[in-house]
Amino acid sequence: MILKPTRLLLAMSFIVAAPVFAQNVATVNGKPIPAARVDQMVKQVVAQGRATDSPQLRELIKKDLIGREVLIQEADKQNVGARPEVKAAIDNARQSIIINAMLADYVKKNPVKDAEIKAEYDKAKAGAPDKEYHARHILVEKEEDAKAIIAKLKGGAKFEELAKQSKDPGSAAQGGDLGWTDPGRFVPEFSKAMVALQKGAITDTPVKTQYGYHVIKLEETRPVTIPPLDQVKQQVAEQLQQRKLAEYRESLLKKAKIQ
């Protein structure tokens, strides 16, 4: 069959337009939503481990993009984007996106090496304490109050009950419990007094620190168990990566002319 010229032109225009139409998943008030935007968002969601690529996911993202397009068109009608506070927020978001992309490039070009991870692990392992301590404490402002607490404890009072009056809100509600920890986390005066105690013992005299006066009880101790490298490799790598990024930022700050 031979098409008339007009029909032939119409058929040809449809064939040419079809691929362009296929590039869009929808149009909202005449504005197209490119299929590439759906592909990009699917890629992000999958990369974050939130879902797997599927027709259902793509349909949800398509509906979300349509809804957002409707809202942004209405916001544009109301000239919301011209508000000073909105412009500032957009500029801040733009900076964050660009900076994060630049830092991601830096990480790709400067990856943490296995040798660096091993060295950092060995260093941490060598510096780790041989024991962990499980202690309780009661913190008060005055030395005489601490002495009175010690006297009550020697008289048979329960440490957990007296700990309710502690100035340390983090442990007072827990009976003064500080959990298992490395002595190095505490100020020197506290650590020295704690490690000198025997299991179940309480300090005979108040321990003065910059925070006030402490009454300390040592519940128990245990050997420190260092996990093997393969169990903490990812964690060590992330710490080293953050350190590299911080050093990169500091190097840029030093080069910058700041007035």
Image (spheres, rainbow, N blue to C red):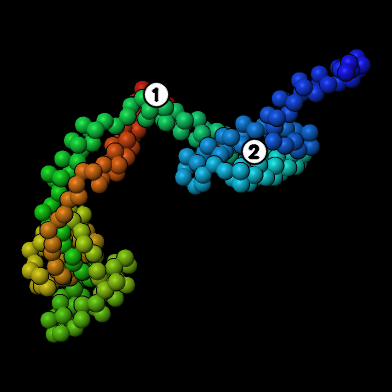
| Residue type marked 1 | Ala
User: Along the horizontal axis of the image, is 199 left or right of 56?
Assistant: left
Q: Residue furthest front?
A: 1
Q: Is residue 82 visible?
A: no
The quarter of the picture where residue 193 lies is bottom left
Q: Residue at x 19, y 41 (%)?
A: 121
For the residue labelled by badge 1, is the local secondary structure a helix, a strand or a loop?
loop
For residue 169, above or below residue 184: below
x and y, in percent, of residue 213 in the image: 19, 67
Q: Which residue in the protein does label 1 denote?
A: 256
Q: Residue furthest bottom?
A: 155
Circle 2 residues within 10 Å: few <14, some 14–19, many ≥20: few
Spatial CA distance of label 1 from label 2 is 28 Å
Q: Is residue 231 visible?
A: yes
Q: Which sits in the foreground, 86 or 224?
A: 224
For residue 164, above or below residue 29: below
Q: Residue at x 29, y 76 (%)?
A: 164
User: Along the horizontal axis of the image, is 140 left or right of 6?
Assistant: left
x and y, in percent, of residue 195 in the image: 10, 61
| Residue type marked 2 | Pro
Q: Which mark is residue 52?
A: none
Task: For the residues labelled 1 and 2, say whether their Cβ atoms are less than 8 Å apart.
Answer: no
The quarter of the picture where residue 24 lies is top right
Q: Residue at x 7, y 69 (%)?
A: 198
The quarter of the picture where residue 171 lies is bottom left
x and y, in percent, of residue 220 in the image: 14, 68
For residue 251, above or below residue 77: above
Quarter of the image for the C terminus: give it.
top left
Q: Which residue in the protein does label 2 denote?
A: 84
